[in-house]
Image: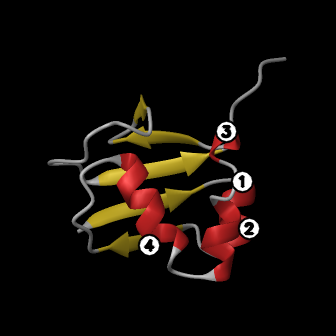
Amino acid sequence: MIEVLYFAWLRERTGLSRETVETQAATVADLVEELRARSEGHALAFSDLRAVRAAVDRRLAGLDAPLAGAREVAFFPPMTGG
């Protein structure tokens, strides 16, 4: 089981701020593929991965990041400074 958190427009598109997911995903990319299949909103949220960032256990991570032992994955749009 892994806790998945959604921020900003990803939360709006999925309709969820968080969900607990039972997964066998090996990487963040594998998890994204599983999440896309959950609902139309999930598919929309992950339709353009160039606009999505991830953190595994609160550390920024790429799509190829392993999930072995992870407890939490957060998805959010790229941050901008200002």
- Classify 13 as above or below 54: below
**CB atoms of marks 2 and 3 within 8 Å:** no
| Gap in angstroms between the C-alphas marked 1 and 2 | 7 Å
- Report the residue marked by disc 1: 8
Q: Which-is-in-front pick, marks 4 and 3?
A: 3
| Gap in angstroms between the C-alphas marked 1 and 3 | 15 Å
Which SS class for mark 4? strand
Classify residue 79 by image quadrant. Answer: top right
* Residue 68 x/y as whole percent: 16, 47
| Gap in angstroms between the C-alphas marked 2 and 4 | 14 Å
Which residue is drawn at the image coordinates 63% and 70% (left, top)?
Answer: 43
The image quadrant where one finds the C terminus is top right
Q: Residues within 10 Å of mark 2 (few under 14, many from 20)?
A: some
- Report the residue marked by disc 2: 12
Mark 4 or 3, nearer chain start:
4
Q: The residue under label 4 is which amino acid type?
A: Glu
Residue lying furthest right in this view? 82
Which SS class for mark 1? loop
Which residue is drawn at the image coordinates 51% and 80% (left, top)?
Answer: 38
Which SS class for mark 2? helix
**CB atoms of marks 1 and 2 within 8 Å:** yes
Q: Which-is-in-front pick, marks 1 and 3?
A: 3
* Residue 75 x/y as whole percent: 54, 50
- Report the residue marked by disc 4: 19
- Report the residue marked by disc 3: 50
Mark 2 or 4, nearer chain start:
2
Which residue is drawn at the image coordinates 38% and 48% (left, top)?
Answer: 28
Residue lying furthest top in this view? 82
